Image (cartoon, rainbow, N blue to C red):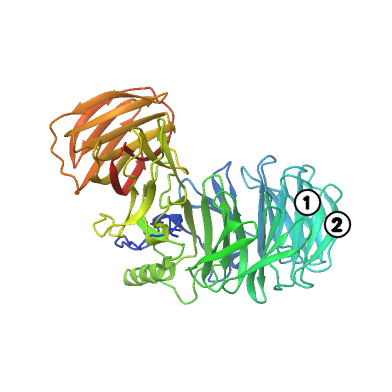
Amino acid sequence: MSLRRVLTIALFLAPLAALTVKAADSTIMELVQTIPLKGKPGKLDHLTVDNKGERLLLANKVNNTLDVVDLKAGQLLKQISGQSGVQGVAFAPDLECVYAALGTGGYCNIFDAGNYKLLKTIKFADDADNVRYDPRTHLVYVAHAEKALGVIDGKSHELKTDIELPGAAEGFEVETGRPRLYVAIPSPSVVVVIDTDKNEVLERYPVKLASGGHPLALDEANHRIFVGCRKPAAVVVMDSESGKEITSVAIPEGIDDLIFDAKRKQLYGCCGEGFLAVIKQKDADSYDLLEKVPTVKDAKTCCFDPNTSRLYLGVPRQEGKEGPERSMRLQIADLRLQIGRIGFNLQSAISHLQSAIRSHNMRLLPVVVAISLLGAGLRADEGKEGALRFSKDDEGKVPAGWKAEHTGKGEGSVWKVVADDTAPSKTGYVLAQTAESPSAFFNICVAEDMKYKDLELTVSFKAIRGKNDQGGGVVWRYQDQNNYYIARMNPLEDNFRVYKVVAGKRIQLGTKEDLKVPADEWHTIKIEQRDDHIQCSLDGNKHLDVHDDTFKEAGKIGVWSKSDAQTYFDNLKVAEK
């Protein structure tokens, strides 16, 4: 995958040239931001996202603060002091409340999510740790030192009960589809199943393939429990219905957070040894470790927002990295990182940045790194740029996150990644339509995970061969295979045209004739659209300027060829305008 998906870093550091690391594989991460925090060197604990307020809430344990990050502005908004030993945090969007669990004293502080005023404090015996909110019942669960889960009524803020456990709870998760909660207990090595209607223990599932279970994640659709274990370091896969152990996957040491990405069928394990483990779910019973992505030692907590496909990683400040209290903001655009089988070295990137900081006599701060997860090399966040790359790991297939479709009836086209040493991206691989004699219809390959309305879109293409048709182009505001905009160049006809396809019928909007564009050479198409205004350029020259308001909503983007046109595509870039 590209952590292997594209990354644009916004760092509050010294000026530095953009870095590029070769992207390859099925899942790509885009490093969107690096946001500085404040505090001493030491541990950052758990974090969660407030989608409603576009904020990130982080337990800054070493600093004894609950940190509130403004995700839209990309900066630390507030540090709520007096949160001694804060470890866990949860957000209840329907109640607009934040719950912070304090390791020192065993308190759970309840805050108003709007103004962060303290609403109530609930006292447990000691060492309040992880927190989870169940929106179905409006109950809040807090792990604490009495080998129990405290249950708080989210509406009344009253302590309802304690659920006794066979050992101290670590990670736990609530099912959304039924009244079940699963708790990882490192000693004894078990997963405890709780009925959240009755708040009673139903089952104890022994974990034998490994022990020392800490984080836990769920795949509800396939009835799977994932337990991040430390002895030895592994993720154990279990059947949530029977408790049967299915398999285990070895990972780096010190896992503290584990996330299941249902959309991409992947697990992300945050490991304190200094790695992000990426595990691919091939099916409910089969799993492969795709990559151990180097991060930073003790960067072991993260959270994932499935609504935006962003993963947030807490990176603690390192000991002995002091300097004058001064910082500068740097936008490092277009940093491409790959997670999958090739991966990127985030440690090297950070070391490079640290050197730059020292050379500018600046102070290194703890940070939160925001990473966007994409399909095969591209992510479309509002106002963000994305870029597509292909790699050997995708060779011979349609990349993950992309879908081959067509307009019209007949035999299908064949889309796959192939090797090409002339690829403009310098990766050596391109996306190609390779069928020699498909029927007379339009061949399309679209990116499934993103939509744009107003945009700037470019793609490089090379016409390889074709008796009836040659060349290709891009599609945008793609609603389905029968409704979209398309601009294409045909070397056989020496023309460059823009069309709309409505209910499967292609309607010409504009054309530029007598353009000599040789086949077997790379050319670039650029599209700019704002509202109903469409401008199309070829190789840096603007040739088409039209207006059309047929498709007013955001749509997918992709690449296109016609009939037997065998065409290579690379270097697709998009920015929302």
* 562 or 575, nearer to the observer: 562
The quarter in which the C terminus is drawn is: top left
Q: SS for tag 2? A: strand
On the image, the x and y values in percent for residue 453 come to 40, 33
* 125 or 287, nearer to the observer: 287
Horizontally, residue 471 falls left or right of residue 398, namely left
* 538 or 109, nearer to the observer: 538
Residue identified by numbered label 2: 202
Tell me which amino acid carries mark 2. Answer: Leu
Residue identified by numbered label 1: 180
For the point 28% across and 45% down, which residue is it?
Answer: 567
Q: Point out the tag, 2 or 1, that comes first from the N-terminus.
A: 1
Compared to residue 345, the image places residue 440 above or below, namely above
Tell me which amino acid carries mark 1. Answer: Arg
Compared to residue 460, the image places residue 455 above or below, namely above
Horizontally, residue 333 falls left or right of residue 312, namely left
Mark 2–mark 1 distance (CA, rounded to whole Å): 9 Å
Does any portion of residue 331 appear in the rendered image? Answer: no
Horizontally, residue 217 falls left or right of residue 462, namely right
| Marks 2 and 1 close (CB-CB < 8 Å) | yes
Q: SS for tag 1? A: strand
On the image, the x and y values in percent for residue 305 come to 56, 49
